[in-house]
Image (cartoon, rainbow, N blue to C red):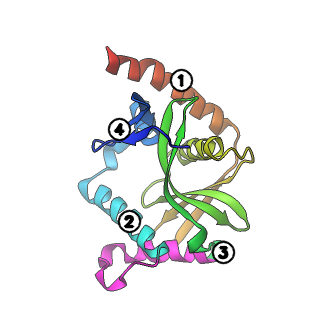
Amino acid sequence: MTTGLVLDESHRYTLDGRRIGGVTSILKALGLVDDRWFTTWACNRGQAVHYGVELMIRERLDWSTVDDRIKGYLTAALKFLEKAGAKPAELQLEKKLVHPGLFYAGRADVIGVMFGEEAVVDWKSGALGHAGIQLAAYEWAERYGSGNPKPKARIAVQLREDGTYTMTRYTKADDYLDWQACCRLYNRYHLHKERE
């Protein structure tokens, strides 16, 4: 359910003309994203890895064009997808999500069947940070938008340069309460300041 949702060139969301927070922006505004390590290289690497994984899943990646510095990350994603039994044609990539009740939006890296169950997956080429809360936000908005109340698995996949990965499943219900608190604080204090 993304009717009326707009993401502008500044990466700001509006829903039916009203400014709402993005998942990452909310976490960052509340001090839950430590961007001291966000060097230009780390940011560019993260974008390249995400785009490369998307091309790989869509079977449009020309491996001969891939920079050697990110090949390992893509290989790690491929290994994860194979182990998870994912079917590329059935995966939803970079899906825009919105939760009008909590006034936030975001884009999930991957939604689809992993290890035999519906899952929301987030790729990480750096630290996990507060991935549990971030994935709770995506999963909650996906459930809201799809109308399917059944929770999906929440999985962060930390990809490494050497072609290995670490998968972390998040199961704490408190992640949803924490996310709801984040939305309340962001909407009440941060967005309120922007409107003044």
Find residue 19 and report its image quarter.
top left
What element does badge 3 sit on? loop
Quick check: marks 1 and 3 in contact, CB under 8 Å? no
- How many residues crowd around disc 3 within 10 Å: few (fewer than 14), some, or many (20 or more)? few
Front residue of 107/155: it is: 107
Residue 93, x across and y down, in percent: 50, 61
Q: N-terminal of the two: label 2 or label 1? A: 2
Q: Which residue is mark 4?
A: 12
Is residue 100 at all visible to an observer of this figure? yes
Give the residue drawn at x 70%, y 68%: 115
Give the residue drawn at x 64%, y 76%: 83
Q: Which residues are magenta?
A: 59-82
Q: Which residue is mark 1?
A: 184
Give the residue drawn at x 39%, y 23%: 191
Q: Which residue is mark 3?
A: 85
Q: N-terminal of the two: label 1 or label 4? A: 4
Disc 2 versus disc 4: nearer the observer: 4
For the residues labelled 1 and 4, the Cα–Cα distance comes to 18 Å
What element does badge 2 sit on? helix
What element does badge 1 sit on? helix
Quick check: marks 1 and 4 in contact, CB under 8 Å? no
Disc 4 versus disc 3: nearer the observer: 4
Residue 76, x across and y down, in percent: 50, 74
46 over 13 or under it: above or below: below
Q: Residue furthest bottom?
A: 64
Q: N-terminal of the two: label 2 or label 3? A: 2
Which disc, if any, is residue 51? 2
85 over 34 or under it: above or below: below
For the residues labelled 2 and 3, the Cα–Cα distance comes to 21 Å
> What amino acid does circle 2 point to?
Tyr
- How many residues crowd around disc 4 within 10 Å: few (fewer than 14), some, or many (20 or more)? some
